[in-house]
Amino acid sequence: MVLIQINGKMVKAHEGEMVLSVLRREGIEVPALCDHQALEPGGSCRLCMVEITKADWDGWTKNVTSCLYPVEEGLIVSTHSEGVLEIRRNILDMLLARCPNSDVIQKLAEEHGVMKTSFDTLPDSDNCIMCYACTRVCEVLGKSAISAVMRGHKKVIASPFGDAPPDCIGCLSCAHICPTNVILWKDENGKRTIWNKSFDLITCKKCGKETISREFADYLLEQRDIPADYFETCDDCKRMELAFKMGGLVDGAEEVAI
Amino acid sequence: MKFRYKVIPSLCIGCRTCELACAFTHAKDKKPGRSRIYPIAYKKDKYVPVVCLQCDDAACVKSCLFDALKRNEETGAIELNIDRCVKCEACVAACPFGCALVDDVHDEVIKCDICEGTPACVQFCPTKALVYEKI
Amino acid sequence: MRIDSIPKLEKWRKKCQREYNSRKRKIFVCLGEACLANGSAEVYDEFKKELKKRKLSDVQVESAIKTGCHGFCALGPLVIIEPEGTFYTKVKVKNVAEIVEKTIKNHEVIDRLLYKDKKTKERIAEYGKIPFYEKQQRISLRNVGTIDPYKISDYIAVGGYTALSKALTDMSPKQVIDEVSKSKLRGRGGGGFSTGRKWATCAKVDDEPRYVICNGDEGDPGAFMDRTTMGSDPHSVLEGMILCAFGIGSTQGYIYVREEYPLAVVTLQNAIDEARDSGILGDNILGTDFCFDIKINRGGGAFVCGESSALMKSIAGEVGEPRAKYVRSVVKGLNDKPTVLNNVETFATIPVIIDKGAKWFAKIGTKTSTGTKVFSLAGKINNTGLVEVPMGISLREIVYDIGGGIPKGRKFKAVQTGGPSGGCLPAEKLDLKVDFDSLTEAGSMMGSGGMIIMDDRTCMVEIARYFLSFLVQESCGKCVPCREGLYQLHKICAKICEGQGTMEDIELMEKMSLTIQKASLCGLGQSGPNPLLSTLMYFKDEFITHVKDKKCPAGVCRDLIKFVITDDCTGCMACIKVCPVDAITGEKKKIHILDQELCTQCGSCFDICKFDSIEIK
């Protein structure tokens, strides 16, 4: 346990924990677009910047991204000082120029008092803020089917050579984790399309409802010890099955304990 | 201290009060969500309240590639840490009993968490068909 | 031949020295990149042919030795004849026969090939007497140009690896680190962090293995000192690294060289092979228990890979992007193991510190910035090239005494130091003492030591725009402020160059620059706005003139200038011939006429006019 001070209040934190997770626990709102608990912190959106200092730093302060800064005994954090707010406003200003059509960015910017970007907006922007959440989630999954390509302002998230990514299993994790909902997919007629790749969806053998992609199920079976037939029925039918199975048992016994 | 969650199908009358209790307890942004418990008729006027069995060797836990599902040793429930969930629906597909599901209202994956030790469904069940007890 | 003990090394050294000194007459032909580009390889071959033809090999002259760069790149190809030190500049193949005939055979000096002093108009025969060399003190470049980089025996003959044998016999690892600490040497790569402290911290980390990395990814436009050191004196870099490894207890080192330096890769690899064969590198160095080996890693040419954490990722085979974590690389660097990363020049300086002692070194330079620093002079300066000077020398001395001033008698306007992340200093700062702290205070930085000199025909807005465009291209794109911010700053700057800027734009640039400095992930982004901020600090008027009067005072920004033919026109027709769009018409000996509608402001006519009768308005 270490003691740190956040906005004047003493707070307990776990050793090795990042400042942002303490802020989250304490209910202190700090925007963080590239942060997700399933992922290692990436530090690319820079919105979770806070100002830190220590008693013996002689009034010297430093701006750090709270998602990556580990707590230290005696750390003094301010999350809403004028300097920090200025940085957040300016970053949102830049993001708004890049993603003028993203409602997520618009809303966040407005909350910080940035109603309009000071810069020329990017024509035909795709609203991607390059937070790497999609590539990081794909890496955690063990696939790394997509990655960031090119450099600087030209950097984009893409599949290898822009083709259908050979390693993609159509799990949609990237699309779901995207903070600005940029990654598009479509489920149609038993097929799922994402990253220009088409996948067969598993259809429930009883009712025909579409569930996850066949390749994702295969990957889960390869990774984890789960009976294959679990994936062949949809959740609705599986609940029915359970009811009938338990009903059969009930007719013999009085109660069923779990 | 260990607890267990028990259903007594013979007492269930299919009134679906548990469903309401669950949906409202898990309301978010003032909107009730989808229930995690469903009384299902297996023959005329005979019901089984279907809810997560909190399996020992749970397929949902095994299927999660992001360690978002963990057992709470106090309550015995397998809890879904929504902050770690990426909505890949692997658990939904893997659960053999269909008890991990997708809440369309809040666009989340949900499963029974025994309300962190005070299950609302148990409190509201008029016939005591649902029991949460010490063992 | 494998040397398995220190006494044997000393014995070998005597042999090397005999051999080195026995070459009574030596012809040094510079084979550095700049001289090569001017045809020095052909000159070298011609010397070989000529000597063979005249059968001079058994008389006095041994042969032309392949040497490294002398640094006086403006005047290449350079040829030096030792031991007299006769210094010939701009030597061509056709001069070779004459040099061999007159200078080698008859000891005559060929006047017209000598260096001519711009001020006194005198021809100077001796290498050391040229002002360019006179004010220099060469420590890191000590052997550059005097030894054959392809021969370990040459390096040993001039005292190479004495520091290593001293460390291995008389010193403990801790003493080596202490000596470096006492010398107060600061990293020459740009940051200026204390080298001794870096080593000491790394040595204390309780983790294995430890790595030594030499950063040879010199990416600053206009900086080429590391290329020269690696290409002309590779062993001093290796010796520095071996000493570091001995100090911190490392067994594996890496040299990260950018792919654009093929010559450096060849010389370094040759040096590593030779050192390994001689028992100076590899297992049981010089018969002791100390083992250390070095590998070369070639970079793909991304500027950001000069940043330490991106460099380490690149070595590990990942995408070269900086690491966002707040962990120092001395604790968790390459493969998350403790790593010391220093720049080429730093490592090349280490052997001298160990050999001559920290006290000797600390006396050179200023109190907080000890020793010497290599600068590469480029841009509008007479003597472009490499110079090594003690810290604390004034900019004026570098520009005027060593650099020989501004060509064509033009006025000095600014000097850009520290590469794209540095800043531009104006004429008022010419008396600034050059060291780490004073440069930072003045709004620039030491960086790796590039110095680009600008004259009054340089537009500072355009310069800021140029450096921003470089950084926009080289930003890795990982974090928002650097990727988006620099892109927007560049766009605004370009707008101002086109005369479309507003006063609000200038304010916005200032505001955003500060955020980029504070919020960027790595050093590239944090220092990215420096060229803009320093030009805004010293040359704000110029920005305002661009915005308010829609004029470019230096006459550079095409959209804001107009070329006008004055009455002085002699009617020579030169401009008519050179104009690519046929905008100039006229007859011989009559004043020409320029059609403003057709003119694209390319400036070709201005450059070709010998009578200064074209003006920029």
Image: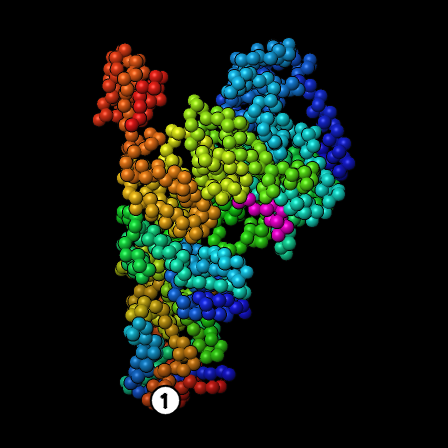
**Residue C544 quadrant:** top left
The residue depicted at 59 percent of the width and 30 percent of the height is: C136
Instruction: Output the chain of dot 1.
Output: B
Q: Is C198 colored magenta in this rendering?
A: yes
Query: Does the rendering let one see residue C469?
Result: no
| Circle 1 SS class | loop
Between A228 and C80, the one lying in front of the other is C80
Task: Give the residue type that dot 1 points to.
Answer: Lys
Between C29 and A141, the one lying in front of the other is C29
Bounds of the magenta span? C190-201
User: Is residue C11 left or right of A239 when viewed as pictured?
Assistant: right
Between A125 and C471, the one lying in front of the other is C471
Position of residue A228 measured from the top left corner of the image (x, y, whole percent): 42, 66
Classify mark 1: residues with Cα within 10 Å, few (<14), some (14-19) or many (20+).
Answer: some
Position of residue C441 measured from the top left corner of the image (x, y, whole percent): 49, 44
Position of residue A80 measured from the top left corner of the image (x, y, whole percent): 40, 62
The residue depicted at 74 percent of the width and 34 percent of the height is: C9
**Residue C331 quadrant:** bottom right
Q: In the rendered image, which residue does mark 1 sit on? A: B128
